[in-house]
Image (cartoon, rainbow, N blue to C red):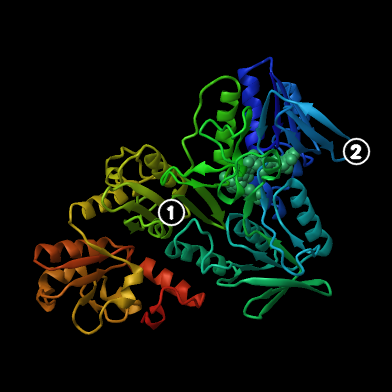
Amino acid sequence: MKVVIVGGVAGGASAAARIRRLDESAEIIVFEKTGYISYANCGLPYYIGDVITDSGDLTLQTPESFWTRFRILVKVNHEVTNIDVTQKTVKVKNLLTGTEWEETYDKLLLSPGAKPVRPNLPGIDSEKIFSLRTVEDTFRIHDYLEKTKAQSAVVVGGGYIGIEVAENLKEKGLNVTIVQRPNQLMNTLDYDMASFVHSKLRAKGISLRLNSNVTSFRQDGECIVTLLEDNSEIAADMVLLAIGVAPENSLAKQAGLKLGVKGSIVVNDRMETSVQDIYAVGDAIQVKHFVTEEDTVIALAGPANKQGRIAADNICGGDSHYQGSMGSSIIKIFDMTVAGTGLTEKVAKSMGIDCESVVLSPASHAGYYPGAKVMTMKVVFEKDTWKLLGAQIMGTEGVDKRLDVLATAMHAGMKANMLKDLDLAYAPPFSSAKDPVNMAGFMIENIRNGFVKQYHWDEIAGLPRDGSVTLLDTRTAYEYKSGHIDGYINIPVDDLRERINEIDDSKPVYVICQSGLRSYIACRILTQNGFDCYNFSGGYRFYASVIKEKQMSECTYPCGMEKLKII
Ligand code: FAD
């Protein structure tokens, strides 16, 4: 069997190695159009920031090491330019010599990845505008920074790559501005959770221009000027474009393979394309979303590697199936870790899913053991079925393991309230006897049992201030004095039983505290005394962070919030 693989990085390289492990006699040839194989895309921003200083560390394998270990022929600087599906040949071009030839295959695997989106804007072709996808791109940016001693940069796009590069440029001493069209960075987060990312970046001195659309670029002396729709201009020494990627589908299109969402290559769960003996994996393909079962594209390294393995199994006569992607992802933003999986609340609602969420601020490990750090966790679930839809977590410690537990629970089809039952490892330096994931489960179980009703940050502005409801802050008098929301009266939770007569039991009571715990206790006291009571999801800490950030970014979302006052 002769297998030809297009693309020698995440999906292609892992498929090649797996094929060899399954079939010692297969002839395997990998064509890679850049000069490197099996490189660490995910490490590229850190080379720009000099966190990774040895360029050799960016490549996990070389053509030589692949040959030595696997007897796989890897041809770098070779581009596959054409597929003849009837003859079962590909046309290959040696990009260094220009030589072209046809290579036959029995099985063909496409793992060509995705290409950075480059909109057709005036001035986009400036040599001061970069994108980051390959090792060569990385060296280009690194060399440019060294040569020009650049002092400032505009990063267009506030997704993972944009933020990682922004952080690395900032750490290198540049003044950095991120320009982002939506009103928030990171579309894998809800607006409320993204506000923590905004605050962190601002605190680290990165300027954010949210709700801002780039219209063109202009070279001005040594500067590149980014022009925005509101007619403002940002001059900088360089621009990094990171506004997203599109499936690399040129070969698939030419070969007549069926294409799907955003031009991605349609495959079945065995990674087979619409043409026999051609497989495809990675950023270039359409996948089923694990939660919604809808067709989508998800460009991440984990899925690409797993799909490569599955394609290899099937190429070698096996029967492996891909179960879908849910977009589990994680990023370091300075000292903060931000992770998410599944659907955000915003996306779930836009799909018409009747969902609810809990927001909690648990400690990374037992509070009495030194060094515990607060994290912010949001778990989204479907109202009637209690199906787990997604989770978002941020903090400085313990975020990754909670996110992975939640992703595992989602994959296993666990109901949201079942999170309370998970038997998770505990000792004070690592967790609490009630792990944050268990805590989320307890909160969901309380909602399910009708013990607690919730309200959310975007409802506060709309709550009546005419006396028809009671707005109750149950923190201490000191905390209340240090900052509270307009219209809320203060009765600390520990005084509530004695002062319960001060609250009108004929009116709904909306309760808040710092993190959601004391207000929950207050709600239980009030509910058992016959009050109609609502607990604020996330607490004042969460609320203040979202609102402060909202005011900073001067956005108008959602309507009416601008009337809100924090005293
Ligand atoms: P790739 O790994 O991109 O490989 C495709 C290769 O195919 C490319 O090298 C390309 O040159 C080659 N190719 C394309 N067409 C041809 C052709 N016609 N002939 C020959 N060769 C061809 N994901 C994460 O999960 N976590 C992260 O932290 C993360 N960080 C990232 C940071 C950066 C800067 C980038 C760019 C990506 C990051 N990703 C991350 C995404 C991840 O790298 C991709 O999802 C993954 O590499 C996709 O694998 P793939 O095999 O589909 O494509």
Neighbourhood count class around disc 2 (C-alpha, 10 Å): few under 14, some 14–19, many 20 upward: few
Left or right? Give the position of 541 relative to 474.
right
Left or right? Give the position of 443 relative to 29.
left
Q: Which secondary structure lies at badge 2?
A: loop
Neighbourhood count class around disc 1 (C-alpha, 10 Å): few under 14, some 14–19, many 20 upward: many
Please tell me which residue is depicted at 56% across the width and 34% down the height of the picture.
Answer: 307
The residue nearer to you, when weighing 538 against 285, is: 285
Which labelled disc corresponds to residue 325?
Answer: none
Q: Is residue 368 above or below residue 56?
A: below
Q: Which residue is mark 1?
A: 393
The CB of the residue at mark 2 lies under 8 Å from ligand 1: no
Quadrant (top left, top right, bottom left, bottom right) of the C terminus: bottom left
Can see residue 538? yes
- Tell me which image quadrant ligand 1 sits in: top right
Please tell me which residue is depicted at 79% across the width and 72% down the height of the picture.
Answer: 223
Q: Which residue is mark 2?
A: 97
Please tell me which residue is depicted at 45% across the width and 56% down the height of the picture.
Answer: 394
